[in-house]
Image (cartoon, rainbow, N blue to C red):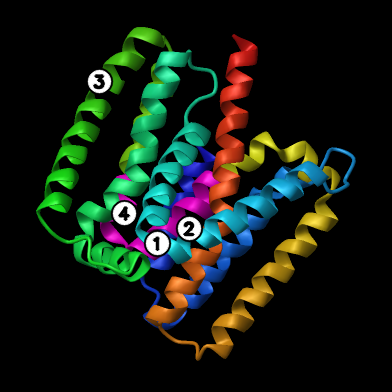
Amino acid sequence: MTELVLVSVLAAALWSLPASAHPLILALGIATGMPHGATDLITERGSISRGALAYYGLGIAVLGLLWWAAPGWALGAFLVLSMLHFGSEDASSESDSALFVHESLVRGMVVVLAPSIFHEAEVLRLFGLLAGASWEGPLWTHVLAATQTLWIGLTFTLFGHYAVRSTQWRRVAHVFAQILVLVAVFRLLEPLTAFVAYFVGGHSLHSARKIWPVLRAHRATVLGATAFTFLVSLAVFGLAGGGALDDRLVRTAFISLSLFAIPHGIWRTVDVVRTRWGRA
């Protein structure tokens, strides 16, 4: 319930901010990503995992090459992996495998699909900027329509799936309240602001509950890295001129974030799947 309230409060607070506040909003999202992914690199003893460090280094190198050689494929991989990561992290870990997969798809698709439906022109412009070519056309229209239909079907059947599997109707109501709030947030706010509200108040907080023992044990390191990341982000945006984000800065920020976000998404998704297999 905390995530639901916090996402709503953040969305309301960010709703009226002008374009000049976009760098601050983006810096908030970047800084929140630091504690969110801290335990990928920090071991329970507080040291840096060499294996994780090598994995991130190799992943960043490969992704950097992919963004340079085939940006359209890099963007596609980012969208698919984002859907899998957000969905698997936000779905109830107490559900059985079939229900977990079902809820993961519904939750993950909201984050990727809702901005494309409610702010199609803006999303297409962003995708064109990132991929170096326009995504607009009949193929995009057909894929978006088919995906929207699939999501509606999955969402309606999820209610029945929960009704059959779960006897706790409070849990069912909570899941669908979260989904409805997310849809409303992405409908009312522009994509960047809506995503930061979801990422800061929902996804990161939900993930932090799982990794809280490590975050608490090494809070000085995590808080210091978070503050440093926030200040560096603000400095970069300030040196770039401040105000509304221009195309060059948006593309640079998005690609830079993806270099860390994609390895993190793969890491966490594999960890979730491995944990569920071990439990089974």
Disc 2 designates what residue?
A: 66
Which residues are the magenta region?
181-204
Question: Looking at the image, do the residues carrying marks 2 and 3 touch, with CB atoms under 8 Å apart?
Answer: no
Q: What residue type is labelled 4?
A: Phe
**Is 114 situated above or below 170?**
below
Q: What residue type is labelled 3?
A: Thr
Q: Can residue 259 be seen in this view?
A: yes
**Is 149 situated above or below 36?**
above
Picture disc at residue 157: 3
Viewer-proximal residue among 126 and 131 = 131
Q: Where is residue 36 in the image (x, y as percent from the top left)?
A: 64, 49
**Sequence-earlier tag: 1 or 3:** 1
Disc 4 designates what residue?
A: 186
Q: What element carries label 2?
A: helix
Q: Residues within 10 Å of mark 1 (few under 14, many from 20)?
A: many
Q: What element carries label 1?
A: helix
